[in-house]
Image: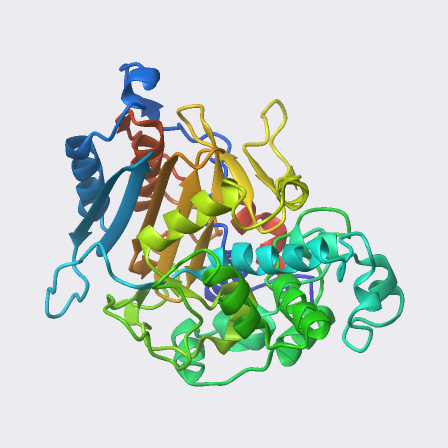
C-alpha cells in the first residue's frame, strides 16, 4: 500500500482486485445509502401503530425475501419490550442443505469493538484511563514519539486517529489472489503486537481528526487495556463485560473452530472466489479485540439492551460512548446518516428512525445489530455469505438485491412497518470503493 500512484497502463483485473481488497478493509458494510440510490420506502401503515408489537407474519416474509434475493441463510432475533420473535431462513450448509436455526452461534466481527470499548470505558470509570490522554502515556513502546503524543484514547475508539488498517498488510495476497490469501491464513496465529505494527507502518486512509475506520485502533485499544489491567484483554472482556451482561453464548474462540452449533460461513470476496468457500473454521487471532468474538442474535440484543439501559457503564461513560463524529463525508445537500461514537454508531434508516448499534463482517460471516436508544425495540441478524456485492471493471457497485433485501428487513423489523425494497438500491456506501482506493 506504499505505492499510491497508479500505473499508467494498469492490469484491469489487478485494479479490480485492489479495489475490492481496499473495500474489505472496512467492515461497515451497511452504512449510508450511496448518492443516487433509491432508498427503501416505508409502508403507509402508521409507524406508531406498527411499533406496538411484532408482526410475525411480516417479519417472516421479509426474512425469507432476504434468502430469496440470494443469501444462503440467515438467523435473527427481534424484540419489542418483553416480546420476542426469532426466525431463520435458508440453509446452513449449501451441500447438505441443512436448514438454518435461529439459535446458531455466529462470528460477529466488528461488533466485538463495542465490547472492547465498554471494557476501556470501565477503566475510565476507575480513573486508570483518560479518554483524552495520549496513547503514548500508556503504551509508549508501541506508539512512540510524536504520534504517541498526538493520538488520544478517544481517537482510537472513534477511529479519528489517522492510523491505517492492518488487514491488507496482514493478507497482502488479497490484491492478487483472495482465495489463496484466505486459505493460507486459515490456521495462522498472529500476535496483536504484530497486527498493531503492520497498521502503524501502513499509509493512513485519512488525516488525524477525520473518521477513517481501521481495525488497528481496536487492536491497540486491547493492548492498552492489557497494560492498565495487567490481564489478557480477551480474558478481561470476558470477565467484566460478557459475564457482567449475563451472556451465555458469547465468547472469544479458543481455537479455529466455533464450539457451539453453527452454520458454515461462505466467502465470495466480491465474486473473486467462485464458488464461495466455507471459512467457518478459521483462526481469528487476526481480528482479536477488533473482531474475533462469537455470539448469538439473542445474546446481542441482550447486550445492547443492557448497555443502552445503563447496566454496563455509568451515565457519564455512556454519554461519552454516544458522543459521535460523522462516519463519512456526505454528498452536497445530503445529511450524514451515520455517526460513530466509541465503538458504537447511530444510523438513520430510510423509514426515518435513528438506531444505535454496530455491524460486523469477517470471512464468511456478516452480522448487524441495532436498537432504539432506550433499547426497547431491537433487531439482530447474522448471515452466512459475505462480500456478495458485485462491481464493474472500474470498481463501481452494481445493483445489489441481497444487500437491498437485508436493509429492507432490518428497517422493517426496527420500525415495525413493512418496507418496500426499491430495485437497484444498495446499502453499500460508495466510500468503500472510492476512486483513490483504486490506486492502492
By what rule are the colours in the image chosen?
rainbow
Residue 27 visible: yes
Residue at x 33% of width, y 34% of height? 81
Residue 315 figure quarter = top right
Whole-percent x and y of residue 151? 80, 58
Task: Assign the N terminus to one quadrant of the image.
Answer: bottom right
Residue 421 figure quarter = top left
Q: How many marks?
A: 0
Q: Nearer the viewer, residue 196 or 104?
A: 104
Decide: is 419 above or below 320.
above
Decide: is 375 above or below 131.
above
Whole-percent x and y of residue 317? 66, 46
Task: Assign the C terminus to one quadrant of the image.
Answer: bottom right
Q: Nearer the viewer, residue 402 or 109?
A: 109
Whole-percent x and y of residue 296? 32, 58
Residue at x 35% of width, y 63% of height? 248
Residue 161 visible: no
> In the picture provided, is 89 more to the left or to the right than 182?
left
Residue at x 18% of width, y 57% of height? 101
Decide: is 103 above or below 38.
below
Q: Nearer the viewer, residue 48 or 359?
A: 48
> In the picture provided, is 192 more to the left or to the right than 429?
right
> In the picture provided, is 144 more to the left or to the right than 2?
right
Amino acid at each position: 500500500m506504499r505505492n499510491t500512484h497508479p500505473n499508467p497502463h494498469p492490469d484491469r483485473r489487478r485494479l479490480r482486485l485492489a479495489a475490492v481488497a481496499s473495500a474489505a478493509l472496512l467492515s461497515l458494510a451497511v452504512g449510508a445509502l450511496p448518492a443516487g440510490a433509491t432508498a427503501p420506502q416505508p409502508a403507509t401503515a402508521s409507524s406508531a401503530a406498527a411499533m406496538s408489537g411484532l408482526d410475525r407474519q411480516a417479519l417472516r416474509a421479509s426474512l425469507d425475501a432476504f434468502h430469496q434475493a440470494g443469501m444462503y441463510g440467515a438467523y435473527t432475533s427481534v424484540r419489542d419490550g418483553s416480546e420476542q420473535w426469532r426466525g431463520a431462513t435458508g440453509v446452513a450448509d449449501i451441500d447438505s442443505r441443512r436448514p438454518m436455526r435461529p439459535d446458531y452461534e455466529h462470528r460477529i466481527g466488528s461488533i466485538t469493538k463495542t465490547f472492547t470499548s465498554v471494557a476501556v470505558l470501565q477503566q475510565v470509570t476507575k480513573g486508570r484511563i483518560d479518554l483524552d490522554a495520549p496513547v503514548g502515556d500508556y503504551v509508549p513502546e508501541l506508539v512512540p514519539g510524536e504520534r504517541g503524543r498526538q493520538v488520544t484514547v478517544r481517537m482510537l475508539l472513534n477511529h479519528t486517529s489517522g492510523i491505517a488498517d492492518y488487514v491488507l498488510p496482514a493478507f497482502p495476497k488479497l490484491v492478487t489472489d483472495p482465495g489463496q490469501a484466505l486459505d493460507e491464513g486459515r490456521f495462522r496465529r498472529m500476535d496483536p503486537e504484530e497486527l498493531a505494527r503492520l497498521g502503524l507502518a501502513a499509509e493512513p486512509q485519512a488525516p488525524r481528526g477525520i473518521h477513517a475506520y481501521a481495525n488497528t485502533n481496536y487492536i491497540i485499544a486491547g493492548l492498552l487495556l492489557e497494560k492498565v489491567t495487567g490481564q489478557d484483554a480477551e480474558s478481561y472482556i470476558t470477565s467484566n463485560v460478557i459475564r457482567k451482561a449475563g451472556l451465555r453464548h458469547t465468547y472469544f474462540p479458543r481455537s479455529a473452530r466455533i464450539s457451539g452449533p453453527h452454520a458454515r460461513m461462505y466467502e465470495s470476496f466480491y465474486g473473486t472466489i467462485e464458488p464461495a468457500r466455507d471459512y467457518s473454521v478459521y483462526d481469528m487471532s487476526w481480528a482479536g479485540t477488533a473482531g474475533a468474538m462469537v455470539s448469538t442474535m439473542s445474546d446481542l440484543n441482550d447486550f445492547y439492551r443492557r448497555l443502552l439501559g445503563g447496566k454496563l457503564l455509568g451515565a457519564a461513560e455512556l454519554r461519552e460512548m454516544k458522543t459521535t463524529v460523522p462516519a463519512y463525508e456526505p454528498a452536497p445537500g445530503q445529511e450524514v446518516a451515520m455517526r460513530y461514537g466509541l465503538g458504537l454508531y447511530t444510523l438513520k434508516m430510510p423509514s426515518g428512525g435513528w438506531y444505535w448499534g454496530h455491524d460486523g463482517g469477517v470471512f464468511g460471516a456478516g452480522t448487524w445489530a441495532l436498537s432504539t436508544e432506550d433499547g426497547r425495540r431491537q433487531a439482530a441478524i447474522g448471515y452466512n455469505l459475505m462480500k456478495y456485492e458485485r462491481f464493474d471493471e472500474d470498481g463501481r457497485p452494481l445493483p445489489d438485491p441481497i444487500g437491498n433485501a437485508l436493509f429492507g428487513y432490518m428497517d422493517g423489523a426496527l420500525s415495525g412497518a413493512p418496507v418496500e425494497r426499491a430495485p437497484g438500491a444498495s446499502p453499500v456506501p460508495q466510500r468503500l470503493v472510492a476512486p483513490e482506493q483504486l490506486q492502492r
